[in-house]
């Protein structure tokens, strides 16, 4: 018979593979959730769609009178706010029970806040309730930032590479700063039976699952290059695309097509390869479909020759993409009949993802939210011959901060994709490192020195006369 558990989240696992969750509610009820592996549980949470729930919660922040700035807030505004806010949590009850438990866990203290004598107390209490409702998607945003650092670029890496990157960024994140409390086995239980972990909230659950994830090597977390959702590859082979769909089309199918297009657009050598391949394929098709005597008017290049050329061209392409040969050498190898005008080819280069402003923002703040830093803005270049205001969208700024990196869907599948070359000059100026203003730097030093003197000076006591 199981012992009586206190309200909380309990994670049960036998070997760190499949996990079982037990949610113990404030009234003592228990809800058992049969889980997947820690990797799959984490991916499910990171990919979960909170958009409808989030929009309902944030609408209260933007529109309810209880948050209006004023000297005194009537308590009736708080009562009306809770009448609208508290039912929102029920949206999570069926679709995200752990998130629902987490919201209720934080709503309890928030709704029990006692009057502090301040005229704006109703606003403060309402904000505490609002933050309780926000907690699940705040934690999801934090976990997405952790994934961006630890998983986005490591499909070819080891588990040690992933763990080391997280530890280098936030030392002690998993094992020391947020310790997992182990519940000892009941007396007499055999060694090696189910382990049970008691967790305070949703965030501790995520860290516990992250810790269990790093204790195994069989499953890994990767990011799909087409949709940028995270997934758990089913094989040990390199997996660029997930098993889901985007806009009703499989990522494995659309991702491969879009990747070919991306490579052709950003690499003139690959673009020349595609043009030459199509030309030779059409030439072989025409010869194959020509009627009796028709082949006399066509270039003698048949299917067998095309297949032989294609085999050699693919080997050359593979060597080029692996960095084994230059673009010039690649084009020389595939241009067997001298059909290309020249062998000069430019190639767009992108900075490593880990060396971009975007990653710096995340590393400095694991709760980094793009919407708080990037907004549509008007830009005026006074050095231009005819200065004019230009709208620089948040999407353009984000693309620049990411160093040009984006999902294939955002490049080619979105209804209104951002042109990566639009407003290039303006964006360069916005993101260029700025020389410090000498006057400002001097003022900083003076203030710091004044503060130091003030802290070190012992002032004479007043004699009270």
Image: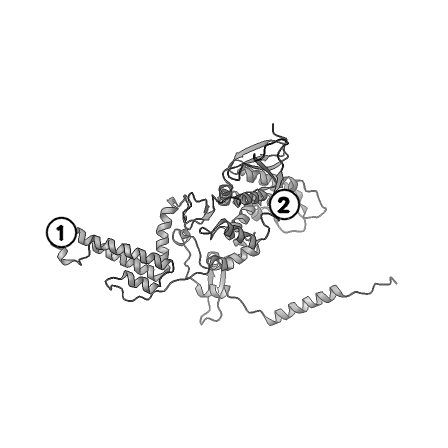
Q: Quadrant of residue 457 in the image?
A: bottom right
Residue in front for this viewpoint, 298 or 39: 39
Q: Is residue 368 above or below residue 445?
A: above
Residue in front for this viewpoint, 235 or 293: 235
- Secondary structure state at the residue bearing disc 1: loop
Q: Residues within 10 Å of mark 2 (few under 14, many from 20)?
A: some
**Residue at horizontal 32 percent and vertical 64 percent from the top:** 329
Q: Is residue 186 above or below residue 391?
A: above
Residue 128 - label: 2
Q: Real-space Cα distance between discs 1 and 2?
A: 80 Å
- Secondary structure state at the residue bearing disc 2: helix
Residue 36, percent from left and from top? 49, 38
Name the residue furthest right. 465
State which quarter of the image contains the C terminus. bottom right
Q: Residues within 10 Å of mark 1 (few under 14, many from 20)?
A: few
Q: Is residue 122 above or below residue 440?
A: above
Judge left or right: residue 268 versus residue 232: left
Name the residue furthest top. 1
Whether residue 329 is visible here, answered yes or no, is: yes
Please tell me whether mark 1 or mark 2 is closer to you in this view.
1
Q: Earlier in the sequence, mark 1 or mark 2?
A: 2
Whether residue 80 is visible here, answered yes or no, is: no
Residue 288, percent from left and from top? 18, 51
Residue 100, percent from left and from top? 56, 38
Name the residue furthest left. 293
Residue 373, percent from left and from top? 54, 57
Residue 291 - label: 1
Residue 166 - label: none
**Residue at horizontal 32 percent and vertical 58 percent from the top:** 316
């Amino acid at each position: 018979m199981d012992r009586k558990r206190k309200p909380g989240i309990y994670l049960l696992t036998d070997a760190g593979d499949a996990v079982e969750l037990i949610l113990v509610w404030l009234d003592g009820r228990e809800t058992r959730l049969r889980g997947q592996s820690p990797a799959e549980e984490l991916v499910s949470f990171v990919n979960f769609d909170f958009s409808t729930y989030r929009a309902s919660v944030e609408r209260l922040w933007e529109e309810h009178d209880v948050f209006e700035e004023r000297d005194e807030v009537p308590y009736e505004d708080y009562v009306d706010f809770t009448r609208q806010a508290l039912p929102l949590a029920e949206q999570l009850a069926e679709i995200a029970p752990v998130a629902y438990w987490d919201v209720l866990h934080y709503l309890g203290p928030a709704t029990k806040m006692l009057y502090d004598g301040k005229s704006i107390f109703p606003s403060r209490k309402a904000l505490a309730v609002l933050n309780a409702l926000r907690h699940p998607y705040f934690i999801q945003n934090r976990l997405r930032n952790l994934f961006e650092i630890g998983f986005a670029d490591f499909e070819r890496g080891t588990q040690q590479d992933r763990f080391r990157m997280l530890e280098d960024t936030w030392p002690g994140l998993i094992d020391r700063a947020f310790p997992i409390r182990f519940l000892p086995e009941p007396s007499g239980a055999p060694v090696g039976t189910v382990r049970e972990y008691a967790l305070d909230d949703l965030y501790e659950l995520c860290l516990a699952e992250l810790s269990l994830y790093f204790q195994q090597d069989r499953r890994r977390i990767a990011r799909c290059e087409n949709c940028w959702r995270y997934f758990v590859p089913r094989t040990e082979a390199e997996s660029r695309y997930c098993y889901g769909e985007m806009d009703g089309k499989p990522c494995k199918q659309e991702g491969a097509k879009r990747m070919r297009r991306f490579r052709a657009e950003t690499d003139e050598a690959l673009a020349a390869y595609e043009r030459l391949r199509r030309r030779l394929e059409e030439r072989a098709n025409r010869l194959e479909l020509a009627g009796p005597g028709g082949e006399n008017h066509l270039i003698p290049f048949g299917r067998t020759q095309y297949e032989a050329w294609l085999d050699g061209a693919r080997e050359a392409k593979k060597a080029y993409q692996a960095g084994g040969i230059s673009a010039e050498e690649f084009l020389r190898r595939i241009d067997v009949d001298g059909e290309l005008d020249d062998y000069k080819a430019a190639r767009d280069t992108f900075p490593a993802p880990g060396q971009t402003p975007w990653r710096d923002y995340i590393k400095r703040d694991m709760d980094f939210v793009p919407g708080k830093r990037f907004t549509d803005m008007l830009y005026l270049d006074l050095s231009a011959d005819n200065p004019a205001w230009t709208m620089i969208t948040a999407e353009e700024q984000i693309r620049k901060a990411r160093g040009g990196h984006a999902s294939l869907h955002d490049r080619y599948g979105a209804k209104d994709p951002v042109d990566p070359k639009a407003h290039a000059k303006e964006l360069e100026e916005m993101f260029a490192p700025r020389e410090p203003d000498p006057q400002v730097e001097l003022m900083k030093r003076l203030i710091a020195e004044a503060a130091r003197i003030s802290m070190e000076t012992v002032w004479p006591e007043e004699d009270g006369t």
